[in-house]
Amino acid sequence: MGSNEKISDRYRLVYDLHTHTTYSHGKGSVEDNVREAFNRKLEFIAISDHGPGHLFYGINRNEIVNMRNDIERMNVKYPKLNVKMSVEANIVEGGNGLDITPEEFEEFDFVIAGYHYGLFGCHCIRNWLWNKGFRSGEDKLKKINTDMVIRSLKENDIAILTHPGDKGPFDIRAIAEVCAETDTLMEINTWHGHMTVEEIKIAAQVEDVKFIISSDAHTPDRVGDYKEGIERAAEAGLDLKRIVNIEEI
């Protein structure tokens, strides 16, 4: 490598499976995201708006059919780009552990999921306080959070666990072991900063875990953003072949 070249300059992103639109918390339309993915020469993109249980910016269940129609139109308009419909479900304690039902899985090409604030039944106030520095009861909260994530992974077919470690204390090693068992990808998110270098190091100790880099784009210009994720993974000493959506140029 040249003195100014970064490791990430040697790789390209093949696909971005975590992007948001105006159907939830994003600023651009489905086509805005798809156009950016096309311009960046991605092979496919997923629209994965926030699950319907979120109190502030979850998708409206009545809009799911319109999302599907938008995505099918994009597959016709951009035949060289494969556009998928997903949802970033929210991890909660009750029911099946997600804010979408098992029946609703059929509405999507695949489901990704992560922990967020802004829902009932997921200890978000305690985690928000922890994130602000109020760390009393941390061990108990860590166990609650970890158990909540593990249950959702075991009870659902989740393709990607989004930004593991974000917004509260979690046992990354225990979660990584279950991701390996359930064939769930662990996301290196270039927006949230999780997984962190340390979290990647911990998860990488579990031999069968695979990783994915996602932009978590809430604006179209961030679709396909990936290089900082590669740099973080390289710093953690991760074998970059374990990241499923990049390839060497």
Image: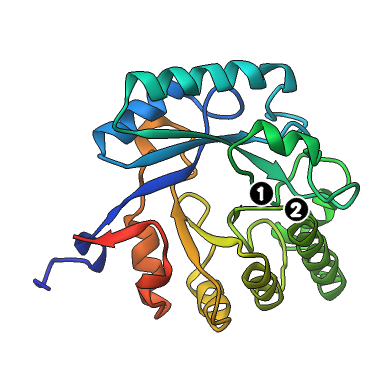
Q: Nearer the viewer, residue 147 or 57?
A: 147
Mark 2 and mark 1: Cα distance apart in space: 10 Å
Q: Residue at x 72, y 17 (%)?
A: 62
Q: Split into 4 quadrants, where in the image is the N terminus?
A: bottom left
Q: Is residue 227 above or below residue 174?
A: above
Q: Quadrant of the C terminus?
A: bottom left
Q: Is residue 106 left or right of residue 80?
A: right
Residue 113 tag number: 1
Crowd around label 2: few <14 · some 14–19 · many ≥20 (10 Å): some
- Total number of numbered labels? 2
Q: Look at mark 2 in the image and give the residue it sits on.
A: 156
Local packing at callout 1 (Cα closer than 10 Å; few below 14, some 14-19, many 20+) is many
Q: Amino acid at mark 1?
A: Ala
Q: Does 113 sit left or right of 234 as displayed?
A: right
Q: Which quadrant of the structure image shows residue 154?
A: bottom right
The three-letter code of the residue at mark 2 reads: Asn
Give coordinates of residue 193: x percent, y percent.
Answer: 50, 58
Res. 102 in view: yes
Residue 29 in view in this figure? no
Percent position of residue 37, x then y: 33, 35
Nearer the observer: mark 2 or 1; the answer is 2
Q: Residue at x 75, y 53 (%)?
A: 156
Q: Secondary structure at mark 2?
A: loop
Percent of width and height locating residue 47 = 51, 33
Q: Residue furthest left?
A: 2
- Residue shown at 54%/17% (left/top)? 69
Whichever of labels 2 and 1 marks the residue nearer the N terminus, that label is 1
x and y percentages locating residue 10 in the rendered image: 20, 63
